[in-house]
Image: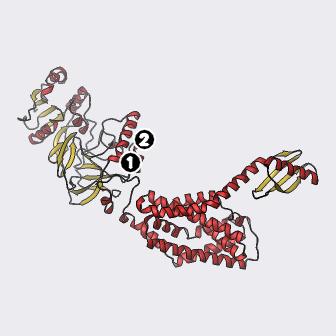
Amino acid sequence: MSDSFLLFDEQAKEQISERLLPLFVDQILLKAWDTKSPAEFPSQSRVYAYVSDRHAPDVIEAAIKGDWILAILPYEGAIYARRGFCIEENLEKALLEAQLATSKKVDVLRCNGKVVLSTVVLGECFNLLPTAKSLSWRDRMSLAWKNITKIRAIRPQKMSFTTENESCFSTALIGLVIIEHAHGSSLSRNILPDTHINDGMCHSMLVAPRSVVEMLRFFVMAPFSRTVNLPNFLGLLKTKSFSVVNGKALTYTVDGQLHQADQLTLDTQSRVLNLLVGPALPIVDTSPSHKEQRKISRLPAGEAITAMVSKELPFVAHAATEEFKDLYQLLRENAKTSNSFLTLMVLSTLLASVGLFANSAPVIIGAMILAPLMAPIISFSMGLVRQDNSLLICSIKTLLIGLFLSLGFAATASFIMPMETITPEIAARLSPSLLDLAVAVISGIAGAYAHARVEAAKSMAGVAIAVALVPPLAVMGIGLGWLDFHVTRGALLLFLTNLAGIALAASLTFLALGFAPFTRAKKGLSIALLGVAIVSIPLVFSFIRLSDESSIIQQLQGKQIGEVTLRQVHANAIKPLALSVELVTPSALTTANIDFIKDNIEQQLQREVILEANIVIRR
């Protein structure tokens, strides 16, 4: 059996005799580590290293060269070594585990030729670092606040990567974390679950936020979560070796020690170290994998890199044109006046007209779903926010064609239909208020989001129903056919309300999702905001009237005047106030009784009333 040696730090002499030697059952040979004259032991010797992080890399180099069987013990100055090799913190337990363990071949990670014990960090990585223990809730809150205060000082830098298989890519990063494995840390449970110390690979986390909002969301939510799931701004790279450059000197840390170099070169030497492995460090028995893995699709690329490098993070993310070319192509197609658009416009208008005359809500809902108007309005909103004149002109042209086509067919339908009655469904579209504007705004947000996010596209039918663009147009056409300009005016206001609300909300949504910088979008947003402001003027008066009517109904509903009870109260807050009410009484009412009831109502409301009453005798 080979001899066993205890290799110790010169500063730990007193601890060796007092704490460590009594723990060894078998004879152990002592040797102080000397950097100038490294120790030499026979091949396959058991070497217990009780050294600090400063000397641990050199000891590992010597162990590889001399083919030792190495056990690293938990020395007080070996924080990174203990973390990197998942060593038990208690010295007695750690030594017992090492004595009972069988040696395993493990990997060694090098950064610019230097052995890495645990972590290489380039730039700012916040709390995305391997830690040996979970933080308390109070500590997590403190760390989150500390990170939030640093956000505005962040400046992304362009980094160019070349991996072992000569695959190259560039992105804009604020930080890079490289580790050999993540076992024994919070990262192993969530972000890097499949890492091993003998898998032949190193693992890198590329920190690349696009906006302040993205970082704030992560920092605000992190303290309240026991797990740290993979955030959108984090890319992952799993490879045997790679290099990083950015055209100037890189300042980085290896196990807490500061270094500077023009290039960062990481290389994993597969299974070169004989290590006495404790139970906390799982070992895979399969052959080392050399299959490179990359999760970098969400990282900045192309134009986005140039827009971000050496600048403050924008408050909201700005996407480059090439990153949403599919969406832009879709919006350009939607802005065109196609045969399918014209056909659906005619069919939806006719269907809405029939539904309005028949007072059928299901038929009108069918027309809402069939209507194609939402698509060019969303394209118009993108044109506004990006100041794309060609998209604006094309979408406006399509909207106008759809508008006049709808009016023409609705007016024609009103001539054909042998009736001229304002049904409840028609009446419901004659007095829009701020509530209708709120519906349009919410629908505009939903519509823009559904176009920008493929996974939300299935909600477009619901958006179409909510905003109901074609029924107001159909009512306008019916009003023109009847030459009833009261009907036409009310429906026109509702249509303009929907149009302005959707355009503004969709533009703001595209801005928030990063499809245009604010400097470019502010002109278009000003136009949309002006349109909403103009439309809102009559809506405010309508909303005030609606609130007044609601207040009157609440005051009178169920009111008892003598033996008479007021039910089914309806109010029209014009001057004078028109009231429709059901009077429930045990006996017939005379004219004097009705005048008394009217006077009582006028006294309570402090205004003149025109009373329309239905008398219900209940005995």
Type of amino acid at the residue the image marks with label 1: Met
In terms of depth relative to the viewer, which is nearer, 494 or 297?
494
In terms of depth relative to the viewer, which is nearer, 352 or 473?
473
In terms of depth relative to the viewer, which is nearer, 45 or 249?
249
For image coordinates 76% across by 51% down, the residue present is: 553
- Find disc 1 in the rendering and name its residue: 215
Q: Is residue 128 visible?
A: yes
Q: Is the residue 182 above or below the residue 403 in the image?
A: above
Q: CA distance from mark 1 to mark 2?
A: 15 Å
| Residue 177 % position (x, y) | 27, 47
Residue 554: mark? none
Question: SS class of the residue under badge 1?
Answer: helix
| Residue 457 % position (x, y) | 49, 62
Give the quadrant of residue 143: top left
**Nearer to us: label 1 or label 2:** 1
Question: SS class of the residue under badge 2?
Answer: loop
Q: Are marks 1 and 2 in contact (CB under 8 Å)?
A: no
Type of amino acid at the residue the image marks with label 2: Ser
- Find disc 2 in the rendering and name its residue: 225
For image coordinates 30% across by 52% down, the residue present is: 156
For image coordinates 67% across by 77% down, the residue present is: 411
Give the quadrant of residue 582: bottom right
Q: Quadrant of the N terminus?
A: top left
For image coordinates 85% across by 56% down, the residue present is: 613
Instruction: Determine whether, in the image, residue 169 is placed left or right of residue 608.
Output: left
Badge 1: few (under 14), some or many (20 or more) residues near its Cα, within 10 Å?
many
Instruction: Determine whether, in the image, residue 88 is placed left or right of residue 445.
Output: left
- Among numbered discs 1 and 2, the one appearing first in the sequence: 1
